[in-house]
Image: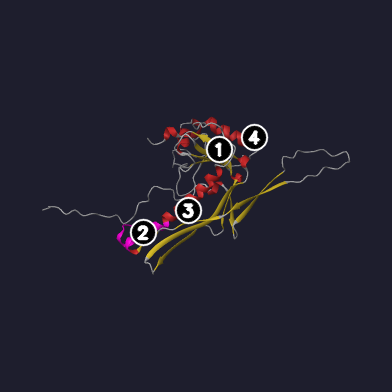
Amino acid sequence: MAETAYMKQYRDEYIHGFERKASLLRDACTTEAVISGNEAEFLVSDSGGAEAVTRGVNGLIPGRADNNTQYTVTLSEWHDKPQKSSFNIFASQGPQRQIMQTTSMGVINRKIDSQILTELNTATVNTGTAAVMSETLALRSKTILQVSDVPWDGNLFAIVSPAAEAYLMATDSFASADYVDTRVFEGAPMAWNDSLKYKRWMGINWISHPGVPGVGTSAEKCFMFHKSAIGHAMNAAGMDVKAGYNEEEDYSYARCSVFMGTQIIQNSGIVVMNHDGSAFAAA
C-alpha cells in the first residue's frame, strides 16, 4: 500500500513558447495601405542620371523629361485559424481561447517578415564569397550603397543573423558607446522582441533576425538596404483578428487574416551580405 498520495499543482497562467510573435521588418519598408483592390502601385521618380547642360546655340535651354517608373505590388490573402473543441478547452490547462488568439497573430506576423526576407533575397547586388561579419564587410556594403547614390538620411537598415550580430559584438567600434547611439549590452537593443528594436551604427539601423535565409549555415543571407528600396502593401484595415464559437459543432476558433504583398522597387538600394554563420551553429 502506498504511504503517500501526491498532488499536482497546475499553474493558471501559461508560459509563452519560444517563437516570434511580432513583425520586426515591416517598419523597415516603404509601406502603403490599400483601401480596395489587389494591387498597389509604387512610383519611383528620378532624373534618369541627367547632367546639367549649357544653353544651346539657339539661345534656348534644352528641356528633358523625368524618369518615372511604376512598380506593382500584388496583394494575396494569408490566414491562420487554430480551433479547439469545447471538451479540449475544458480538459486543458490554461486559457486556451486566449492562447489561440495569441499564437494566430504570431503566425501572421512571422509571415510578414518571411515575405519581406524572401523578396530581399532576390536582390542582385551582393558582397561575393561568404565571409564572417566584420567591420570591413559592413563598410564594403555601405560603400556599395553610397556609390549607387543611396542617401545617408537615417533610413538605412541592416538585417543580420544572430551569428553576424555575435561577430559584430566583438568589434570595438560596434560594442563601444562612443560609436553608437545605444549600448549593445543595455537592454539587448538589437534582439527581437514584441516591438521593433534596433541599434544605430555608422548611420544604419541594425536588426538581428533569426529568420534570415540560410540562418545557422555557411550561406546566411544578411541585407543592407534603404527603406525606399522595398515596398510592402497591406489592406488599410490591417490585420483582421476574430474569435468565435460554432454552436452546431461545439468548437471555438481564432482567425487572423491579412492581405499583403512585398516588392523590390529599387534594386540598387539593396546589398545582399553573404555571411558564414556556421561557427555559431548548434552542435
- Give the Cα distance between marks 2 and 4: 54 Å
Q: Are circles 2 and 4 on residues that touch, CB within 8 Å?
A: no
Q: Give the residues in magenta.
A: 87-101
| Inter-mark Cα distance, 3 to 2 | 19 Å
Q: Residue furthest front?
A: 249
Q: Amino acid at mark 1?
A: Val
Residue position marked by numbered label 3 in the rendering: 108
Q: Which residue is mark 2?
A: 96
Residues at circles 3 and 2 in contact by the CB criterion of under 8 Å: no
Counting other residues with Cα less than 10 Å from the Cα at mark 3, is it few (<14), some (14-19), or many (20 or more)? many
Residue under the image location 46 percent in, 62 percent down: 242
Which numbered disc flags the more N-terminal residue, 4 or 3?
A: 3
Q: CA distance from mark 4 to mark 3?
A: 37 Å
What residue is drawn where x is 61% and y is 54%? 40
Residue 87 image position (x, y, % from top left): 32, 63
Q: Quadrant of residue 255?
A: bottom left
